[in-house]
Image: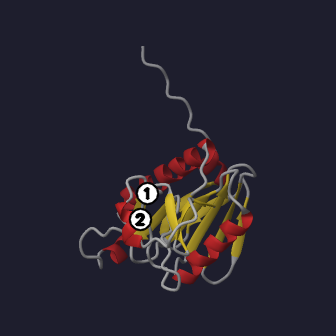
Amino acid sequence: MTTVAAQKRVTPEELLQLPERNGLELVDGQLVEKPVSKESSRVAAKIIYLLSAQAVRTGEAEVYGPDLGYQCFPETGDIRKPDVSVIRRERLARLAGDVGYMPMPADLAVEVLSPNDLARDVAAKIEAYLAAGFPLVWVVDPQTRIVQVHRADGSVTKLHEKDEITGETVLPNFRCKVTDLLSIAPEMPANG
């Protein structure tokens, strides 16, 4: 987590007005750049694809990418942007209109680690998600090929490549091997 510049405190409204806001979060009133890498971006895209395919099949939820900010951290006023998030449709039905920031926690937040992520920043972000009411958080590490599943009840499960990951209560029918979240899609056959 890199603070963009030592500056005056920024409000969520001011962040929304910035033309280059997609890679920025608001933490303790400061703009913070989200660390990314080629591999973390690829893995996040793969997770969005897999979760979206299930969400479309069942109609149970909506899947969002890293540009959706969550403004549901009442103690700090932070704006956090998970790499992937999922919200169940029955909860979304309670929202009126198209909001600038999501005012409620996602049912699932996914953070895909990049080489520039600091362990203390990731731990703080997980704690913030859980304290704000996100019931399920996946932390995906492409380098170690491990996924940690954090739950609101405080339990944590560490999954390795051969293990199966599920959508639990968020997307009950979603399941795949951890290696499928991390793998590169097979090449499409050439036409002709």
Q: Which residue is drawn at 61% across and 54% down?
A: 35
What residue type is disc 1 on?
Arg
User: Within 10 angstroms of label 1, few (less than 14), some, or many (20 or more) residues?
Assistant: some
Location of residue 90 by image quarter: bottom left
Q: How is the image coloured?
A: secondary structure
Closer to the camera, 36 or 84?
36
Residue under numbered circle 2: 15
SS type, badge 1 = loop
Mark 2, secondary structure of its residue: helix
> Which one is nearer the viewer's eye here, 39 or 80?
80
Q: Which amino acid does label 2 sit on?
A: Leu
* Residue that badge 1 annotates: 21
Q: Residue 104 carries which label?
A: none
Q: Where is residue 63 in the image (x, y as percent from the top left)?
A: 42, 60
**Residue 61 visible from this viewpoint:** no
- Placement of 164 over or under 45, stated as above or below: below
Front residue of 98 and 28: 28
Mark with earlier residue (2, 1): 2
Q: Image check: 175 left or right of 99?
A: right
- Image check: 162 left or right of 36? right
Q: Distance between the residues labelled 2 and 1?
A: 6 Å
Residue at x-position 66% and y-position 73%? 124
Residue 177, image x, y percentages = 63, 53
Locate the C terminus and report the quarter of the image it occupies.
Answer: top left
